[in-house]
Every structure is written in structure tokens, then in C-alpha cells.
Image: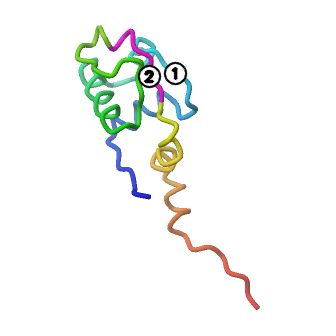
């Protein structure tokens, strides 16, 4: 299993969408994301969809107007790896050796 490295804007979008598998409309996503312009959000979504982390009801999104009517959700195949990539404690726990029983 390879480690997932995400940028700050990708982390913001994924946290806004939630990692529970529910669908989010592009219009709702745009209103909830703080600090990202419309074009930047579109770029981030296109990148996440290209890698396969996010699925949309429409694959080829070129304009912000098209993005507003599309539903997005996190791909369930990557959900566990994305959750560990977003949570720094999970990475620390993976690197920490397990306790051994003394005899």
C-alpha cells in the first residue's frame, strides 16, 4: 500500500466533502469551501477525479457552471487510505512498533 500525499487545497476539499461516502452537489461544495476560488476548486476536483479519489456524476468538467450541477463523492476504494492521509495520528500509529509481551 503506497502513501498518499495531498496538497493543502486537496485536503480542504476532501474534508469538506467528508469521508463517509455521501454525495455532495458542486453548488453546495462551492459554498462550503473557504479560501478557494471557483477556478481553483475546479482544478482540485479535476485532479482528485483524475487520480480516482473522487467520483462525479459527470466525468469531463471544464467550466464552473458545469461543476455546480454535478454530484461528487469520495471513492470508497480509497476511503481508508485517504482517512489515514488526513489524520496525522494514524500515520504515527503505523510507524509505532506494537507492544510485545514479556516472558
Please provide percent x and percent y for residue 52. 37, 37
- For residue 70: magenta? yes
Which residue lies most toward the bottom here?
A: 103
Q: Is residue 59 above or below residue 92?
A: above
Q: Nearer the viewer, residue 61 or 34?
A: 61
Residue ID at (40%, 14%): 70
The tag on residue 72 is: 2
What residue range appears in magenta?
67-73
The N terminus: image quadrant: bottom left
Count residues near mark 2 (Cα–Cα under 10 Å), then give few for <14, some for 14-19, many for 20+.
Answer: many
Q: Is residue 96 above or below residue 51?
A: below
Residue ID at (47%, 43%): 78
Residues at circles 2 and 1 in contact by the CB criterion of under 8 Å: yes
The C terminus: image quadrant: bottom right
Q: Quadrant of residue 37?
A: top left
Q: Which residue, given by chain and number where applicable, does mark 1 sit on?
A: 23
In the picture, measured across the screen, residue 28 lies left or right of residue 80, that is: left
In the picture, measured across the screen, residue 72 lies left or right of residue 102, that is: left
The tag on residue 82 is: none
Cα separation, mark 2 vs mark 1, equals 5 Å
Please provide percent x and percent y for residue 57. 42, 18
Which residue lies most toward the right here?
A: 103
Amino acid at each position: 500500500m503506497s502513501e498518499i500525499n495531498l496538497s493543502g487545497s486537496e485536503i480542504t476539499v476532501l474534508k469538506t466533502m467528508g469521508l463517509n461516502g455521501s454525495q455532495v452537489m458542486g453548488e453546495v461544495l462551492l459554498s462550503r469551501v473557504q479560501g478557494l476560488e471557483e477556478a481553483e476548486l475546479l482544478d482540485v476536483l479535476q485532479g482528485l477525479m483524475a487520480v480516482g479519489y473522487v467520483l462525479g456524476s459527470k466525468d469531463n468538467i471544464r467550466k464552473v457552471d458545469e461543476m455546480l450541477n454535478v454530484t461528487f463523492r469520495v471513492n470508497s476504494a480509497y476511503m481508508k487510505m485517504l482517512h489515514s492521509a488526513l489524520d496525522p495520528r494514524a500515520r504515527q500509529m503505523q510507524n509505532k512498533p506494537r507492544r510485545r509481551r514479556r516472558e
